[in-house]
Amino acid sequence: MDIDFKIDLDHGAHQEHYCPVPQNKSPYETCWSLTKDVGSGTITKIEPQPGFVIYVADFELKKTMITSFASSDSAVGFGFLLSGSGWARAHAVPYRGDFMAGKSSVFFYPNQCGVMKDMKNSRRRSISLIVEPERFNRLLKGSLDGIPREFRTFLDGTSRLGGYSLDRGMTSLISQALEPFFLCPFTGAARLLYLESKAMELIALRLSQLTAETKDQTRIKELGALDINKVHQAAAQLHLDLENPPSLFELAASQGISHAKLNRGFHQVFGTTVFGYLRTIRLFKAKQMLEQGRFNVTETAMAVGYSSLSSFARAFYAQYGMAPNQCLEKRAV
């Protein structure tokens, strides 16, 4: 599955074209490294089998970077964003999506054409799984039970006009399943098989989440656009003060919405409760702080609002499958 992309560096009034040189690490893996003047890190393309591609992005920018991509091939995709600041826009979908840490996307595009903008001084860590629709149907053996009707019409070939995209928060199981892509212990053929199996696991976890949401939505009426906007504003408010966040009732009152509707809205938009969303972003911030190596475990726990180290350690392990001090140990190695 081939896709052409180019990178521009945004300098305000003009853009400077920049194209990193790809390095073929193996017949199935290509890596693009950013130069020192742009930032540091890599974008890696892994193709374990024809029609199935894994993109692993792990880079930190000094300058704003605009990436445009183009392919006439249709695709089913699963995106997972651990960190980043910017936005993405696919031409097939009539809106752009802002990067939000902890967000997972499911999409169908009749063609892979669009643009992404990563802001300077930001670090992007993301996994994207791109599958040809025919191959995806073969993986599912034609079983589309539980998949939202709008998505299912693209998968079964009923519709090929426009595109589909659905964003949700990541579950703790999904967050844990992402780490092996950045810390794969294998090389060669073993690496290929391992990463393919982890990609399949991610797809299974995301489809399971999607199926559960579909069942819930048959019982609960979805919120309208105005209330969804209030949910996004409430989520942004939680990011402002992780140490002393507003209570559920205070948060709901600030947006002029009932606490029950706010919780329902968080389920609809992020796949979890307000408290579950807060826990996820607190632990993600904690992981970032520990990886930077400037704070110890106690300082980190307090900074993100945990007064109990044992509670912090349990929650951290549940989300990332490791103890907080293991982040510090990995940095020290």
Image: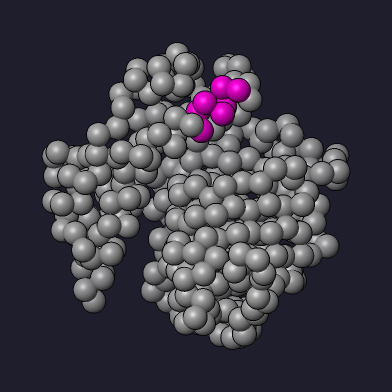
- In this view, the residue in front, 262 or 108, is 262
Q: Magenta residues: mostly which secondary structure?
A: helix
Residue drawn where x is 68% and y is 76% of the image: 17
Can see residue 68? yes
Can see residue 272? no
Query: In the rendered view, would you say 162 is above or below 263?
Result: below
Quadrant including the N terminus: bottom right
- In this view, the residue in front, 187 or 17, is 17
Residue drawn where x is 59% and y is 86% of the image: 23
Quadrant including the C terminus: bottom left
The span shown in magenta is: 226-232
Query: In the rendered view, would you say 100 is above or below 248?
Result: below
**Residue found at the far front of this picture:** 13
Q: Position of residue 50 (x, y in %)?
A: 71, 69
Q: Position of residue 59 (x, y in %)?
A: 47, 69
Instruction: Specify how the rendered protein is coloured.
Output: one colour
- Is residue 131 part of the magenta span, yes or no? no
- In this view, the residue in front, 97 or 135, is 97
Residue drawn where x is 25% and y is 59% of the image: 290
Query: In the rendered view, would you say 313 is above or below 261?
Result: below
Image mark count: 0
Q: Position of residue 196 (x, y in %)?
A: 55, 65
Q: Quadrant of residue 64?
A: bottom right
Residue drawn where x is 66% and y is 71% of the image: 15
Q: Position of residue 255 (x, y in %)?
A: 46, 21
Q: Quadrant of residue 246?
A: top left
Q: Going by the image, does 221 lie left or right of 332?
A: right
